[in-house]
Amino acid sequence: MKNKQDLFYESVLNTLKSVATTLIEQEYSLINDLSMTGWAFKINENLNMITDTKLKEKIEKECDEIWGRWYAKVKEEQLTPKNLSLLNAFLES
C-alpha cells in the first residue's frame, strides 16, 4: 500500500506528465523548450521524494518516454537541413 507522501508525489508527477504531453502537442517554441527543461528538473526533484521503489520506477519510465517524445519532436522540427546549414554557416564565420 502506498503511503500518503507517495500518493501526493504521484499526483504531482501525474500533473507534470499531463503538462508535458500538452507541450509536446503544441508547435515547438523557445518557451516550450524552456518549460520542458524545467519539467525535467521538477520530475527529478519529485521522483526523489517517492519511497516506493516500484512506483518510482514506473513513473520514471513513463517520464523517460515523454522526454523521448519531446527529444524526437525537437530533432524533427529544429534539426532540419535548413537550420543545420544556418548553424554551420554561423559556426564557420
Image (cartoon, grey):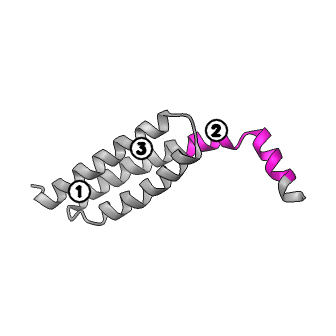
Residue 56 sits in which quadrant?
Answer: bottom left
In the depicted structure, whether residue 23 falls above or below residue 64: above
Q: Which residues are magenta?
A: 71-89
Q: Quadrant of the C terminus?
A: bottom right
Which element type, helix, strand or loop, lies under badge 1? helix
Q: Quadrant of the N terminus?
A: bottom left
Q: Please report the residue visible at 47 percent of the width from the left and 50 percent of the height from the top.
A: 35
Which element type, helix, strand or loop, lies under badge 2? helix
Label 1, label 3: how far apart the Cα atoms are: 16 Å
Inspect the image, locate mark 3, and give the three-letter code of the amino acid beneath it. Answer: Ala
**Label 3: which residue?**
20
N-terminal of the pair, mark 1 or mark 3, is: 1
Label 2, label 1: how far apart the Cα atoms are: 32 Å
The magenta stretch spans residue 40: no
Q: Please report the residue visible at 18 percent of the width from the left and 58 percent of the height from the top.
A: 6
Which element type, helix, strand or loop, lies under badge 3? helix
| Residue 52 x %, y % | 20, 61
Residue 28 sits in which quadrant?
Answer: top right
Q: Mostly what secondary structure, the magenta segment? A: helix
In the drawing, what numbered circle is on residue 76?
A: 2
* Extreme-front residue of the structure: 31
The magenta stretch spans residue 84: yes
N-terminal of the pair, mark 2 or mark 1, is: 1
In the drawing, what numbered circle is on residue 9?
A: 1
